[in-house]
Amino acid sequence: MAEAKTVHSPALTYFSMISLLTLCPPFVILLWYTMVHADGSVLQTWDYLKQHGVQGFIDIWPRPTAIAWKLIACYAAFEAALQLFLPGKTVEGPISPCGNRPVYKANGMQAYAVTLITYLSLWWFGIFNPAIVYDHLGEIYSALIFGSLIFCIFLYIKGHVAPSSTDSGSSGNIIIDFYWGMELYPRIGKNFDIKVFTNCRFGMMSWAVLAVTYCIKQYEENGKVADSMLVNTILMLVYVTKFFWWEAGYWNTMDIAHDRAGFYICWGCLVWVPSIYTSPGMYLVNHPVNLGTQLAIYILAAGITCIYINYDCDRQRQEFRRTNGKCLVWGKAPSKIVASYTTTSGETKSSLLLTSGWWGLSRHFHYVPEILAAFFWTVPALFGHFLPYFYVLFLTILLFDRAKRDDDRCRSKYGKYWKKYCEKKMSSYDNVIGGKLKLKGKALDVKAGGVKKKKKHKKQYDQNSEVTENELSADGSTRLSTDPNEEDPNDANKSSGEKNAAPYDDHLTPAERRYIEQREKLDVNRLARISNKSHRDRIQDFNQYLANMSEHYDIPKVGPG
Ligand code: NDP
């Protein structure tokens, strides 16, 4: 799997890799210092650094202490044991570029429950106080930074000397290999999957553990927990619970199925997730804002809604893939494209691309509720300081970059099918919404100009339909839901016009189908017919048509002219 090609230009790729390798570790320490020792104020930290220079920065960087190493080692060993020994269903991941199919034990939810129950019990029964973790947070992050760098070097060497599968290889460039990783599915032995450990059981689990830690620390300090902290902790826990509930689905996402095990994903999950992702809670420990019950409930409800939508987007895509498209999406048979691709070993395979439901709204729509959810668990901190919002900003940049990387990857994987996938949505919207708006704007104008515009639309629509029909005949694999099992269950109730609607219609509502049908009649048959009518009759005809349409669209009703 040699792959020296980069998504962005080589200069930008190297610049961003070197920047992230060198800047992320000190940033983690500066963020911790600002949150815990500088009142969350970037200006205060900036003033300190201005006064004390590099030596000041070295002074605030905590040394990894024995207690920090012990805490990390106990936590890592506990999570590794849960991953290995808790029972769970056997599930298969997606086929890799080299044609391998990884097998996992789906015991994430059990591990999550055992972890939280154990952690809370240790506190409740006075065996271990989680506030200690907060008190040694700087040392823990420092140890994680160095420990994870060493771990990434181990991954690099393992990729060279003992790869676990054929999904491994060098780009020929040491920086790219270290940064992006070499192995897609590195394992220790047959069963211990390293990426499941780093991403899920260490990284994501630490998010929940630290959220609870911050809450307990505030309680230990103040004798109570502010409602802002409660909202923040509940939303983060709901998010992480959703993650573990859906962990087997996560094994189908880019992080696992496409990103190889290197600094980017593994160091990110081992250090960046526990420090940056949890940072709004870290800030709230020393800033117990009181929101009031009503505001707290509104924020909570908005956050949970966003997390649910994000979950539902992921669920929809995975259910669709799992059932091979034989499922309902928003109560209807899904519309889709069957896209074939070639693996690196030369085999031809195919995947289904969902084009209705959340996935019909836009590509990567699910990133919107993801970002909003992060905003809602941060907003209890109100707007006194910028730093708690750093995660929201970071996530927005990360997801934009991710969308671009994914788009490029899918374009090179699926080629013309990806292009059709992108065009399909554009065309549907263009035809339906574009046509509708123009009709609205020219509601009373059936003279030359208005007709020309409609004709232009009709032509464009026909061209699009032709492209699809040609594709259909030339290549069965790009068919759009022609399988009888894939038909809309409501088809029996549709008119023949609706049934014969152009392939782009297959995720339109019945009202939209009727609209297009009517518009076609108007554009072709009726225009020919009415050309023999008087001007008054033509106006009347058209007004009748608009009156019918206004039932479904916001077109003003007009009386006879
Ligand atoms: P996605 O779930 O968006 O999966 C992308 C992959 O899905 C593509 O590579 C392609 O893979 C396949 N695909 C693309 N379009 C379609 C389609 N229309 N129908 C079917 N399959 C399609 O990947 P992410 O990993 O980015 O996101 C997963 C979740 O993780 C999301 O909820 C996201 O918000 C969250 N996330 C959170 C982050 C955080 O830091 N908080 C960071 C990143 C993600 P294939 O090759 O199989 O066709």
Image (cartoon, rainbow, N blue to C red):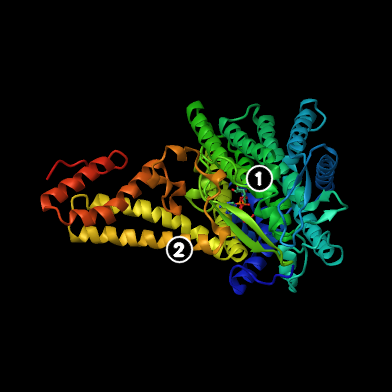
Q: Are marks 1 and 2 in contact (CB under 8 Å)?
A: no
Q: Mark yes or no: residue 86 visible.
A: yes
Name the residue nearer the viewer: 517 or 179: 517
Q: Which residue is mark 2?
A: 467
Looking at this view, is 333 or 438 the one in front? 333
The quarter of the image holding the C terminus is top left
Residue type at tag 1: Arg
Q: Amino acid at mark 2?
A: Val
- Residue 546, located in which quarter of the rendered image? top left
Q: Position of residue 250 (x, y in %)?
A: 68, 47
Residue 284 location in percent, x, y? Answer: 60, 39
Q: Is mark 1 within 8 Å of ligand 1?
A: no
Nearest the viewer among 497 and 347 is 497
Q: Position of residue 212 (x, y in %)?
A: 69, 35
Could you tell me if residue 446 is visible in this image?
A: no
| Of callouts 1 and 2, the N-terminal one | 1
- Image quadrant in which the N terminus is located: bottom right
| Helix, strand or loop under label 2 | helix
Q: Is residue 115 left or right of residue 457?
A: right
In the rendered structure, find residue 322 and report the number of the disc placed on it.
Answer: 1
Q: Are there few (<14), some (14-19), or many (20+) residues within 10 Å of tag 1?
A: few
Left or right, 318 with respect to 163, comes to left
The residue shown at (76%, 64%) is: 182
The answer for how far apart the CA atoms under marks 1 and 2 are is 29 Å
Q: How many marks?
A: 2
